[in-house]
Every structure is written in C-alpha cells, then in structure tokens.
Amino acid sequence: MDIRSFSQLDQVLNQNIALLVKEIGEHIKDMLRKNVDELWYKRGYTPTHYTRTFQLINSITVTDVKKVPEGYQVVIFFDPDKIHPYPPAKPREWPRHQSVTDGADVSFYIPWWVEFGQKSPLFSYEGVHAMEKTKEEVIDDEWIKQRIKEVLGVRGFIVK
C-alpha cells in the first residue's frame, strides 16, 4: 500500500482499527458467553420449577463499532429485547421471566439477578459475577495485545 499523505494514513489507520475493535468485541462476547455458561448454566443446579430458555446467553450482543472522541468503541451487553416472558412450559412449573406472584414481566432484570443475585423469599440465590470475571480476564488477556500487534503488523505497522 502506497500512502502519500497524512489524511491517507489516517484513513487506513481508522479502517484497520475499526475492524480490530469489532474483532476484539466479538472475542470478549465469546469470553462472556463462556463465563455465563460455566458460572450460571453449568453451576451444578438443574431447575425443577421452570424450563430454561437460554435467552440470557443468547442475548449477549456486540454493537457496531462507533467512533467516539477517545477513539473507537463497541459495547458488549445483555440485550433485554432478546429476553421474553413465557408461560410455564409444563404443568406445575413457574412462568419464565415473569413474576410467579403477579405475572409481571421481569425479563429486564434477569441479567442483573444472574450477575448480582437476588433475595426473593420464594427463590433466592447468589450472583455468579460473569461480567466481573470477564472484565478481569479482558484486563489480563494477552490475546488482545497480541492480536493488535498481528493485525496492524500484517498491514505494515510496527507495534511494540
């Protein structure tokens, strides 16, 4: 690639960084999915009062890359629009993502309760802190640093 001006250099850098940020966002999403799976779904508890929908893990979303004053960003989050209330799947089961007392939609709270726990008199549990663990792993993840070097290095940039 023949770069002849600072504006061309800026354009090439911005394109490559945006692609890299999206790739890193997808990697972090995978890390969060793994942690939710291990810490929530495989924690040794099999529900008997309801049937799992797996909408929590499937709601993990990465936004498109956005240019912000500090650079580029993606947001990895639990999308509440992908978690829905359902009536009981079987007789004598609780509804899914609905209050068992009044039928109110509580799907918005599911990610919060999984992360931090909840103290319901009917069914309380401790949070599993999957987002917190993922954040710690991201901070310690040499993969991200190495990937930045690789992607920019292939394109002729020297990254130390």
Image (tube, grey):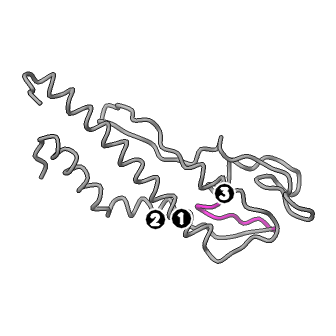
* Residue type pointed to by label 3: Phe
Residue under label 1, please give it: 129
Q: Residue at x 46, y 65 (%)?
A: 133
Residue at image coords 12%, 42%: 157
Q: Quadrant of residue 120?
A: bottom right
Label 2: which residue?
Answer: 133
The type of residue carrying mark 2 is Lys
Residue 103 in the image: state x and y as whole percent: 86, 50
Does residue 4 sit above or below 119 in this rendering?
Answer: above
> What range is drawn magenta here?
113-122
- Decide: is 126 above or below 60: below
- In the shown orientation, is residue 18 left or right of residue 82? left
Q: CA distance from mark 3 to mark 2?
A: 20 Å
Dot placed on the residue nearer the N-terminal end, 3 or 1: 3
Mark 2 to mark 1 CA distance (whole Å): 6 Å
Q: Residues within 10 Å of mark 3 (few under 14, many from 20)?
A: few
Going from N to C along the chain, the mark reached first, 3 or 2, is: 3
Residue 15: x %, y % from top left: 27, 32
Outermost residue toward the right in this view = 91
In the picture, the disc for residue 54 is: 3
